[in-house]
Image (spheres, rainbow, N blue to C red):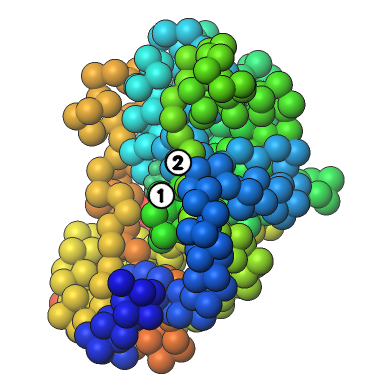
Amino acid sequence: MKHSDVTDERTAMEKPEEIRMVDLRGQYLRLRDDIGRGWDAVMESCRFINGPEVSELESALARFTGARHVVACGNGTDALRIALTALDLRPGDEVIVPAFAYAACAEVVCMAGLVPVPADVDAATFNLTPESAERVISPRTRVLMPVHLFGQPCDMEGIMELARRYGLKVIEDNAQSLGARCPHRDGSAPFAGTVGTIGCTSFFPTKNLGCYGDGGAMFTDDDGLARRIRMIANHGQEEKYTHRIVGCNSRLDTLQAVVLNVKLPHLPAWNEARRRAAAKYSALLGETEGITLPKAAPGADHVWHQYTLRVAGGERDRLRQWLASRGIPTMIYYPRPLHLQKAYRSRMRLGCVPEVAERLCGEVLSLPMHTELTDSQIEYIGSSINEFFAGSPHRHDSMGAAAVTVGSPT
Ligand SMILES: Cc1ncc(COP(=O)(O)O)c(C=O)c1O
């Protein structure tokens, strides 16, 4: 089937006004000629694995972020796993992860025979902080793994100071914040994912920079680590059939590299479109009682991978149903903290009770967020939320106080 056949068939099925949580189609329609041309070239050359488009992408990402080395790989989870493997850790060594995050960070730590140690997060930014991480450091701690959640980088300056003080490595999980900057006190503002020992990202289709399948990449300024990472991702070999270390097979397909090469130059404008959508949501919902809006921390950059409200007082699920009845999809990222997931619980060391993470899981609600949202869609979503709270009989008794205990956004 040709690309255009897919397009025609889907156009006929879709309602133009439908609100989607994520809309990949609008971007595809604008870019499909360039992507199609690139794909045709790959099909002609048959260089499906390690075609020149992959190293082109690595160089383009290095230029874009300022990282000295970029190594593409099969997906974001592999990026984290390979990064951990490259650090030569010992079984039982501890890695600090946020308790409120996507499961991949705890999963890869367990897979590597290491011990995940959950740290609590900040209610306003949803992120791990230097203070929350320091609370769970032990003599076995070797790595900090901050996750730049929902598009907002963690306080990397503080995290790197902590790492230096305790002699720790830092692996940044930057799957959700590619293109966001980390402002430093000296006026510099390096990109998230380029500050720690190794940064990792995902090109899962819904990410701010996504391909049309699985993909990921690792970023580092360390020449030795870059070489090691590249070997691990390629069966531990540099020359074919000479395996120097134990590795795995984790490669970005050439066809996916074509998509990313076409999309990367648009990333700054797409992140800006997300900022505009977030600002519009915040303007519409700023006066609404019963919800706490997400905000960028003072001076922080934010690329709004998600726009996530907090709805206290047990009203979150009712609001979600109300919005669904009005044709508005929402998602709960994440319904359960990592320390309460059966798969990881018994393998963790629990150095604190991550109370904020537990509370957030009962309160968070992510609204539709993507580059194709129209003003009228955002207005409709905003007015539907306001209508819910205007009509809620529980508005004052069950929500006001609870919303305050979560902490107000900075
Ligand atoms: C924060 C975070 N880390 C890691 C990953 C894993 O990426 P992938 O799905 O490409 O393996 C994701 C993707 O969903 C993510 O959001």
Q: Amino acid at mark 2?
A: Gly
Nearer-the-camera pick, 1 or 162: 1
Q: Residue at x 38, y 74 (%)?
A: 3
Where residue 360 appears, as percent x and y from the top left, is 33, 50
Q: Amino acid at mark 1?
A: Asp
Q: Quadrant of residue 317?
A: bottom left
Where residue 145 appears, as percent x and y from the top left, is 51, 31
Name the mark on residue 74: 2
Label 1 belongs to which residue? 214
Q: Residue at x 37, y 14 (%)?
A: 113
Report helix, strand or loop for mark 1: loop
Q: Counting residues from the N terminus, which is met first, the one under dot 1 or under dot 2?
A: 2
Residue 410 at least partly seen: no
Disc 1 + disc 2, Cβ < 8 Å = yes
Q: Residue at x 26, y 72 (%)?
A: 329
397 versus 214 height, above or below: below
Nearer-the-camera pick, 142 or 61: 61
